[in-house]
Amino acid sequence: MATSSSSSAATTNLMLAIHEKKTNTVELYRPLRNYIAFHYSEREAQNLDDDLETVKQYRSDIEKSSDSPPARRDLLLKYFKCLCLMETRFPISADKDHINSIQFTWFDAFKTRNKSSQINLHLEKAAILFNLGAVYSQIGLAFDRSTVEGRKQAVHNFVTAAGVFAYLRDNVAVKAAAGGSATVDVSVECAGMLERLMLGQAQECVFETSIAKGSTPGVCSKISRQVGVYYEEALAALSVPPLSQHFDKTWIAHVQLKASLFFAEACYRYSLELHEKEEIAEEIARLKAGISALSDVKRSTKGAPAQLLDAVSKLEASLNRNLERAMKENDRVYLQRVPQATSLAPLSAFSMVKPMPLDEILDASKEKMFLSLIPDSSTKALSRYTEMLDDVIRTQAEKLQQGSELARVRLKEMDLPDSLLALEGNVTLPDNLKEDVEAVQISGGPAGLEAELQQLRDLRRVNHELLVQTEEQLQKEAQEDSQFRTQFGTRWTRPQSSTLTKNLLDRLNRFAGNLKQAGESDARIERSVRDHSALMSILDRHPIEAALPTLAKPIMSLDASEDAIVGALKQSLRQLETLGAERAGLEDMLKEMKRKDDILPKLMTSTGSYEDLFKKEISKYDHICEEISQNIQAQEQLLMQIQAQNDQFSVVFNLEDFKASREKCFKQIEAAIAKYQEIKENINEGLKFYVTLQDAITNVKQQCSDFVMTRNIQCREMMEDVQRQISGLSFQDRNSSNQSYPSVGQNHQPPRTMSPQQTDNVNISQASRAQAPAPYYQPSPQQTDTGNVSQAPGLQAPAPYYQSPQNSSMPGYATPYGSSQGPSQQSHPPSYHAPPSTGSPYQSQPPHQQPPGGYDYGQPAYPGWRGPYYNAHSSQQPSTFPRPPYTVPGPYPPNQGGYYRPQ
């Protein structure tokens, strides 16, 4: 036991310090290295050689105990952390599979002849903790308590020593006792007694500070009483086994004397406060109680230090002096009845100190030693903790998300903040409706429909002109044939034009009928555009929100409270938004804490229950969980407040009527979009129809041109034959002229005997035939249409360029483009007929096939044509839309033929 004294305003106090335990030398390096090499690898043992050397050096320094107290403190802390790291990695016990060659021996600090030896780290850790607390007590005792800073440092070291002994009692002492016969100094009882002793001395330093700075008697009394309480608790532990027979009598006398001394000091200080209040009777009773306590302790403190006995005598004199004065005043002035000491209430006590928490000081999780050695038990424990933590994070994240979703749904039900935005003129369409309106406006809107209708008119005109041109070609050829037939009579032996062109004329008539019905459909579309222009005009508003109704203040107001109502509602919404932002921050905080939460080092140093460690670590998240719960509760209350405010807002601003008018406007926009899309679709179908029809008419026109060219060649040849007959050719030549004229496409053989001039004419005819397109002169037998041509002897009609439906290259257009059957043989009406009551006015056309090879595509249908179905690029896919049609002749005045008369 070491003692130190210092003088204060009240007494000269002595305090105690504790000596360290002694130990024997222990070899740690070789057993630990052998274990690593055997259970891990030699390479691992080599990598950890520096750590093993460090542990060996620490243990050697502990055995010397020749350093100063601060140096010893740092050494003991480092070595204790090493022991924590070793405990989870190196099984040191008497088990044959464990490290059983390390035996730790420690001697009792109070009875040095007693010792304990164990083959485990628990005794080693307990002894190191005991020595650490002893060193802290020595450091605290070394400060000069006559100064403010000295007393402050003394308090710090005493409470730290108390924390060390408390940690020893709660975490290590029981394990050390279970490992074998541990000495009494590291027992639970002794650690608890030393904790109380250190707290008493720390509180005593605080009492000295309160006296030095002149605190009130009441405050000094409470602090002094707590000093006595700590000493009384230490005395109680010293008075019972196993400590009653273990400590020297001077220890017991010292603690007993301190307990009575500070009880009497508290009575003395409290009596001074009572005297100021003129409570003389209780003052006398308190003074007598203090004097009695000092008188009793002096009879049982044999061997107590002289300084403490002197302090007791001085305090006793002060008590007697004040008691005498108080009794005289009571007898002369107050005449109050003095109560018995047993009837007095206990003196108030106030603790200014508590054991220092050592979790951070003794935390070895940040140490870098033996990091590569991770037992399976620690890995499994880490996995378990991770699952627990993930469950906490998931639960809290779901609460946050549910809170945000609840706020969104509740605001949607109350039509907030849309109604407030409407009051400010910021009215918006629903997202899906706004997208549809934007799509309509991008495509040109209702105002652009007139341009597309004009496209329909232009395409219909182009088709009509093509039909007229084709009819003129056939009519002209028929007139010429009729004139020659009238002029030459029976000598004109080739078939009549009307016989050969019957199929072509039937097709042209069907095209004319389709075109007429298409015009009627166009007229219906134009009427629909006119009839619904007022409905669709809303789609041309820019921005479309300008067409929506607005929310306005009531025209008449009784109390002009509208602004206050709106302001309160806006303020509540801002508060709700703030709560939402806080939830986002809390969720980020949870994720960040989880990211930084590395519990493995703590698991590697933990010697207690993993579940206790898990609960402690999970508790770090309690404050965030509590904040989340408070946020959800605050939001619920705020939503109730917003509901009440919104109800009031709805009544004042007649919100129901506004919603009804807004919904009506929404439905009007939806109806306008639907009608626009219907008309747009019908126009597009019409455009596709006209382009496809133009393709078919162009094909037939080409066939007619080929037919006319062939007939012209035949006409010139027959004219030559007739002229030879009239000129009086030989009888043989006349017989040859009576033979059937070769059909179109057959080689024409010159006569056996002819003049040079005739031979030249024949050569010219053959050259002309050679220049004509081969398909029109060399028809295959399959292409011969037996119902279309009345065959004259030796004359065959040219095969049509456009095939019948059975052989057509465009199977979808059999009806509108013509067939091998005559008009009377059609099994169904033309495809472009009056539309049904619903849907498109145009009958859908089948996909258009790729035109025949060698087809010449020319300019668009008419200048400026830019229909959506038209794509002049070569990458256009066949069978989707027709490719750009056709070289169209320049416009000319239409000739109304007999087969087609526009209605």
Image: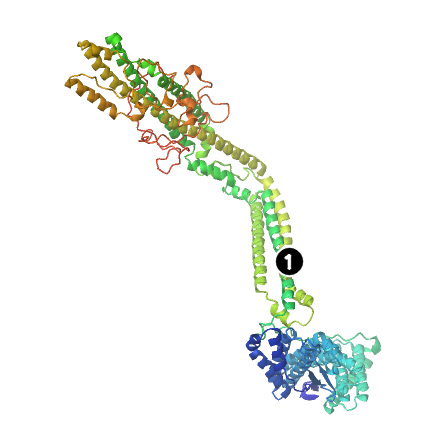
- Above or below residue 474? Residue 297 is below
Q: x%, y% of residue 278?
A: 76, 76
Seen from the viewer's position, the closer of residues 441 and 301 is 441
Q: x%, y% of residue 509?
A: 38, 18
Q: Hey, which residue is sitting farthest left in the picture?
A: 756
Q: Is residue 523 visible?
A: no
Q: x%, y% of residue 873?
A: 35, 37
Seen from the viewer's position, the closer of residues 8 and 597 is 597
Seen from the viewer's position, the closer of residues 568 and 182 is 182
Residue that label 1 marks = 391
Q: Is residue 749 visible?
A: yes
- Above or below residue 496? Residue 889 is below
Q: Amino acid at mark 1?
A: Asp
Q: Quadrant of residue 242?
A: bottom right
From the image, which quarter does the C terminus lie in?
top left
Q: Secondary structure at mark 1?
A: helix
Seen from the viewer's position, the closer of residues 829 and 562 is 829
Dot 1 alpha-carbon crowd within 10 angstroms: few under 14, some 14 to 19, many 20 or more: few
Residue 563 lies left or right of residue 787; in this view the side is right
Residue 428 lies left or right of residue 787; in this view the side is right
Residue 353 lies left or right of residue 745; in this view the side is right
